[in-house]
Amino acid sequence: MDAASAESLLRTAEDAHVAMRRGEDASAIQLIETHYPDIREAMAWCLAEGRTDEADRFASALVPFWMATKRIDDGHRWYERALGSSATSPRRARAVYDDGYLVFWAGRYELAGRRFTEARRLAQDFGDHDVVALALAGSARVALNTDPGEAIRLLREAIEVTRDMPDSLGRSSANHVLGVALQMAGDLEAAREVMDERLEHARTTGNHIVVSVESANLSMVERQLGNLDRAEALSLEALRIDSRTGDAMAVPWVINGLAAVTAAQGRLERAAILLGMAESLLERAGGEWPPDEREQYEGTLATLAAGLSPAGLGNARSAGAAMSLDAAVAFALSGV
């Protein structure tokens, strides 16, 4: 490995990251997969050469890849190694945040909370308001487990911090999590307003990943408001995007939402099959339910337990759990 090769691989990783965030197809994930051994070597070379900023840039570029391909542990191990160095720079705050973001989705909330707090401190030291807002949004994600009101407070702070940065990633993240927090706090109309605005903007700009995320979240809101047809359509739209991009972590979240809508429609056996799929796919992806998804999952399970016999519920969940990812997506999209 040499500097020219490492720089070329870094460009490849960062370009793929941009493409992954657009969510058009699975080609960006496939590109990283092809170059992954060389990228890992380049990251290690950067650390050994003291090029910590480049090492941190590599890792930030790989976060969506690690999540989408069941490699959260791989990413966290890398961050443990990289963050063990004594280097401190503006990039380091983002690296600390990214590690917290990764482990959050694996359900390691205590560690995630520590990382977000540390990232916020580092970002404040360097005057990086964007990462301050990201870290506040991360802390709000953790707070959703116990106190949606505290999460909303943190998110309002993040939005205020970025008031002069309308297009910043930190502000976007804070607005996204705000919609979730408002939904969990029971303010469904306010949640719908935030999510609808983000969804419309994402459609206008062609950001398919945000379309998927906000569609899935808005489906949860519309279901609770009794708008089951729209809730189902939103979940199916999100699933089509996530299945096209090959994101193994996002697919079970969306199927979880579709199971909730299907149960609300009274199609209990189908909902139980969908729930079994979501449970199994999430376990295979190495993830845990985030707070809002867990609340939705537990509500669906309670509805199914009340309406199906124990044997019927168990058999349907087992049937769903036995499906491959492709079979599960095909079944979910069939709508019958």
Image: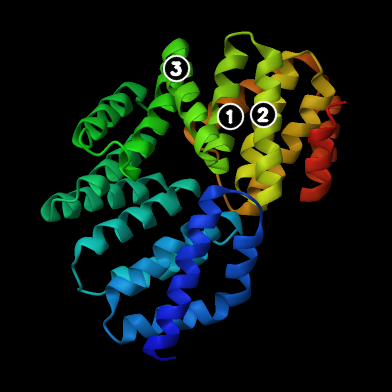
The three-letter code of the residue at mark 1 reads Ser
The mark found on residue 235 in the picture is 2
Secondary structure beneath label 2 = helix
Residue positioned most to the top = 226
Picture residue at 45% right of the left edge, 24% below the top: 197
Q: Residue at x 76, y 49 (%)?
A: 325
On screen, residue 201 versus residue 70, left or right, reads left
Q: Position of residue 226 (x, y in %)?
A: 63, 8
The amino acid sitting under disc 2 is Ser
- Residue where numbered disc 3 is placed: 193
Pointers 2 and 1 in contact (C-beta within 8 Å): yes
Of mark 2 and mark 1, the one earlier in the sequence is 1
Q: Which residue is painted at 70% across and 24% down in the image? A: 233
Query: 42 or 198, which is in the foreground?
Result: 198
Q: Quadrant of the N terminus?
A: bottom left
Write down the residue under mark 1: 215
| 3D distance between C-alphas at marks 1 and 3 | 13 Å
Residue 107: in sight, yes or no?
Answer: no
Query: Whole-percent x and y of residue 75?
Result: 47, 64
Is residue 169 or residue 142 the one in the foreground?
Answer: 169
Write down the quadrant of residue 154 in the picture: top left
> Where 148 sits versus 265, above or below?
below
Camera-side mark, 2 or 3: 3
Measuring from the top left, give residue 280's x and y in whole percent: 71, 45
Tell me how far mark 2 sits from mark 3, CA to CA: 18 Å
Judge the density around disc 1: few (<14), some (14-19), many (≥20) Cα neighbours within 10 Å: many
Q: Amino acid at mark 3?
A: Glu
Q: Does label 1 or label 3 sit earlier along the sequence?
A: 3
Vertical arrangement, residue 230 with respect to residue 107, above or below: above
